Amino acid sequence: MNPLRNHKSYLAAIGHRVSGIALALFLPFHFLLLGSALDGAQGLDRFLVYTDLTPVKVAEWGLVMMLSVHLFFGIRVLFLEFTRWPGHVNDLAGWVVPCCIAALFVGTVFVIQVL
Amino acid sequence: MNKIKRETQELTVRVWRGKEDGKLVTYQVMSRENQTILDIITEIQRFQEPGLAYRFACRVGVCGSCAMTVNGRPRWTCRTHVKKVSHEGVLTIEPLRNLPRIKDLVCDLAPFIDTWQRAGAPFSGTKTRNDAPALVDPESSTRRAAEAGLQCINCAVCYSACDVVSWNRNYIGPAGLNRAWTLINDIRHSDRKQTFDQAFGDGGCGSCHSHGNCTRHCPIELNPSESIAGLKRVAFKGLPKDV
Amino acid sequence: MERTLFLAQRISAIILGPLVLVHLGLILFAVRNGLSGAEILSRTQGSISWSVFYGLFVLSVTVHAPIGLRNILQEWSRISPLTINIVALLFALIFLLLGLRAVAAIV
């Protein structure tokens, strides 16, 4: 591992970036699916039947995780850039693990709800 | 036991030779007490490889010219003890990252120096020699903000450590932006707005992703990351007021 | 220009923060009995608040995501700056048109 990249802030930045790319690529398809509701509930159901398939459920879980990761790491970036308080640690590296745990929590609740 | 003893007696030093298309060449160097990386390079140059090119001047951490990449991290070689960085008696010494290589451990600093100009670095005063010197309150928030970044000596360690620079050569980088931040907080500077516009222009502070490598590697523990965050906050809040 | 894009991306991020939290909560609630078109539409159809909520969501995403993609392409690809700007604008157009169509479809 490149020592310049072997730290938590780098992990957070890459996690934020990769999840952002995944969301940006997924979103047009999400919108297309929802747009099928122009034909009423049947239009939606044509696609939603696939959500019972296990691989699709796994993919949904992945997207929920990506959204959570992007949200929590994004909140960290905003605090990192725009807030200062006494004792503010410069790179907020201590936030990285809690952000991951928060995202995992959301993912776990999703699994519990689906099962 | 035998192995450990041997390692303490002799170091395996891999040194970059040539330009971009060069290669690492291995040398064996005696291990000594209180040995710096610069001592190692000097020993190789004097006794094994007279053609080895490297830069240094003061040897005591004042000039910043001996910065190189040691085991993957940019450092001042004169202030880096071998014991602190060697992995099982092995050292890898390369020129600074993110800069064109000239020969062996010497790289061309011109692109780095250019970033200072692009960040709006030149100071321009408003007073003439006939005016009284400006009164700067050492306790004011602007002076304290400037003070925090003033000691930079342009060694390019942060520029070399920065991943955003490695991805986007158009990025001004930590040192230039740190300089812009000190100027924006200098109440004697005549055009703080112009400096800010340049620091937030093409390749400016908006490109920083707060990885924090600049702050982590600065040999004199400055905090360019904080300076850049300061510039970003100016985008929202306007230029810092003198309070 | 860079400063405007930076501000636009951070402001849209501040707006998206709470929206995404609510959206995640809704996802976790909605998937409990499987997804059905009737259930989704019964929640959203005729609701002014959901249409405002998701309308704002789509607009913020339209601002936020293409600027991020532009940054990533500048750093991780060798595509020319002009092409990158065109790609980012295309993404913005796709998000805006498909997004507003989706909101119109469900309310």
Image: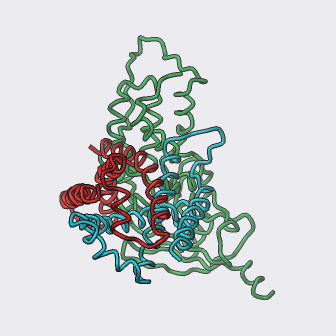
Chain colours: A cyan, B green, C red
**Quick check: can you spot residue B90?**
yes
Image quadrant where residue C40 sits: bottom left
**Residue at position x 52%, y 33% in the image:** B146
**Residue at position x 47%, y 72% in the image:** C33
Q: Which x, y percent locates residue C50?
A: 36, 50
Q: Which x, y percent locates residue A71?
A: 47, 57
Q: Is residue B79 left or right of residue C57?
A: right
B110 or B33, which lies in front?
B110
Q: Is residue B20 left or right of residue C101?
A: right
In the image, residue A57 above or below residue A86 = below
Image quarter (top left, top right, bottom left or bottom right) of the N terminus of chain C: top left
**Quick check: can you spot residue B96?**
no
Q: Which x, y percent locates residue A42?
A: 26, 72
In the image, residue B186 above or below residue B46 = above
Q: Return the residue found at the far right.
A: B1
Image quadrant where residue A58 sits: bottom left
In the image, residue C101 above or below residue B53 = above
Image quadrant where residue A62 sits: bottom left
Q: Is residue A25 left or right of residue B210?
A: left
